[in-house]
Image (cartoon, rainbow, N blue to C red):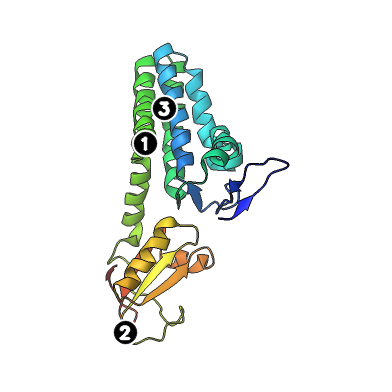
Amino acid sequence: MHVRYIGRMSTALPLRRADPYRDLLVIDARAPRFNQTVVAAGSLLAVLTGFWPLLALLGTQLAVTVLFGRRYCLPCVFYFEVVQPRLGEGELEDSRAPRFANIIGAVFLLAASGFYAAGFATVGAVLAGVVAALAALAASTGLCVGCEMYRLLARLRGIRGGALEKVDLQQLGVTAVDDVVVLFTHPLCADCQTLQPKLEQAGRTVVAVDVSQHRALAKKYGVSVVPLAFHVAPDGRVLSRA
């Protein structure tokens, strides 16, 4: 195992596969759950005590994180600098779904604080309670409703099998006459690393497109999440989603 050493510490820490502040396409899956734990606890505390400014603080923190990045997310920084070095890096996932969930959380929390401030405490409590419940669900089970909403919207925007009609195989450097599977992937995506061997073991010819190196292709074909695989005919027609 690769290790790194910090200062004079004698404890060897696992080397990160992804820099949390620079590799923004992926994120340690534990980080969003840690953040969701903070949001759930803070929202519940605000509802129980009626201290609604806490909701405004949480909502502002999520909004700042979305706009300016993880360096300004206090729970995220605490996780990456204190928790992750002790537990090690978890599974890496596409960061766009958690980011979308943060946007929804920020809107709900800021709206809740606004209703509280305007004297509509019941409405504010309901909105904050929804955030607390969904954040607690995500933190405890990994089921992130906001993330699932993002994936559904991504499919509706055209990445489900059949929506993409043709792939330019020549542009990908493919000259094989047999059917191929075009796999959009990322080197830090854990699911991508497991899907490609499975397809190859099944006898499929796989053409991997690294979206971190070919952003224009990812944009051209509407790739919003990875991994994404299409069964493509020799003439480039998309036959199905693999």
Q: Earlier in the sequence, mark 2 or mark 3?
A: 3
Q: Position of residue 82 (x, y in %)?
A: 58, 35
- 140 sits to left or right of 34: left
Q: Position of residue 75 (x, y in %)?
A: 54, 33
Callout 2 environment at 10 Å: few (<14), some (14 to 19), or many (20+)? few
Please state which of residues 6 and 241 is positioned toward the viewer in this rendering.
6
Q: Are marks 2 and 3 in contact (CB under 8 Å)?
A: no
Please tell me which residue is depicted at 43% across the width and 56% down the height of the picture.
190
Q: Residue furthest right?
A: 8
Q: What's the amino acid at mark 1?
A: Ala
Callout 3: SS: helix
Q: Earlier in the sequence, mark 1 or mark 2?
A: 1
Please tell me which residue is depicted at 39% across the width and 68% down the height of the picture.
183
Q: What's the amino acid at mark 3?
A: Ala
Compared with 153, 162 (above or below) is below
Please state which of residues 128 and 123 is positioned toward the viewer in this rendering.
128
Q: Earlier in the sequence, mark 1 or mark 3?
A: 3
Which quadrant would the C terminus be assigned to in this image? Answer: bottom left
Q: What's the amino acid at mark 2?
A: Asp
Callout 3 environment at 10 Å: few (<14), some (14 to 19), or many (20+)? many
Residue occupied by mark 3: 40
Dividing the picture into quadrants, the one containing residue 123 is top left
Taking the image as drawn, is residue 104 in sight?
yes
Callout 1 environment at 10 Å: few (<14), some (14 to 19), or many (20+)? many
Please tell me which residue is depicted at 44% across the width and 64% down the height of the picture.
185
Callout 2: SS: loop
The total number of labels drawn is 3
Callout 1: SS: helix
Residue occupied by mark 2: 178
Residue occupied by mark 1: 138
